[in-house]
Image (tube, helix red, strand yellow):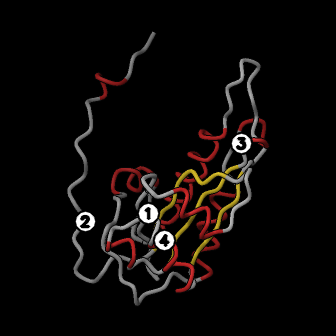
Amino acid sequence: MTKTITNFHDLIHNRRSIRNYDPDRPVSDEILHKILEAGRVAPSAANFQPWKFIVVKSKKFRKKLNQCYHQPWFHDAPAVLVVVGYPDRAWVRKDGFNAIQIDLTIAMDHMILAAAEEGVGTCWIAAFDETRLRKALNLQDNEVVYCITPLGYPRKGYKKARGPIRKRMEEVVEFR
């Protein structure tokens, strides 16, 4: 399998959200392991690692997940990654700020970039039906789903969209 990106800066500039998956081309366990390893080694506040990553590959469970997010392209993905956090296990600052969302965002970003490095498409999703998703996965009360992403290869002939227009450096960076 050929990797599509060879350099980190190319990777971050060329990664796109994919919304067109080949349902007949599964992601190998070897590549899934690389993606999950990227999340496992991600930094977290005080190194608490308050997370769990669930990979849904079986048709039975994917069908349940399809009830949680109703976009047809999502239903074609051969796997779905669910990022679960434990707010009660996350680092909390003295003023009460809980770092759980930051920790899980970093882990998810690591996994999305690792997937892109392997040529696997992703699309960060937060607009899912949390109640249905929790029930489908039989989650405990202290387990919170923060985001999901399909994992799969783009359909043959799929053309990546032009990259999003980004603000100029001078608009977002300030030196003091």
Circle 1 sits in a helix, a strand or a loop, which is it?
loop
Mark 2 lies on residue: 160
Q: CA distance from mark 2 to mark 4?
A: 16 Å
Task: Look at 50% across and 71% down and name the residue there.
Answer: 65
Q: CA distance from mark 1 to mark 4?
A: 10 Å
Classify 168 as above or below 79: above
- Residue type pointed to by label 2: Lys
Residue 2, image x, y percentages: 43, 79
Image depth: mark 1 or mark 3 in front:
3
In-image side of 78 versus 53 (left or right): left
- Marks 2 and 4 close (CB-CB < 8 Å): no
Task: Sort mark 3 into few (<14), some (14-19) or many (20+) by Cα contacts within 10 Å.
Answer: some
Residue 148, image x, y percentages: 51, 60
Instruction: State which tag comes first along the sequence, 2 or 1.
Output: 1
Task: Sort mark 1 into few (<14), some (14-19) or many (20+) by Cα contacts within 10 Å.
Answer: few
- Residue type pointed to by label 1: Thr
Instruction: State which tag comes first along the sequence, 2 or 4.
Output: 4
In-image side of 88 versus 154 (left or right): right
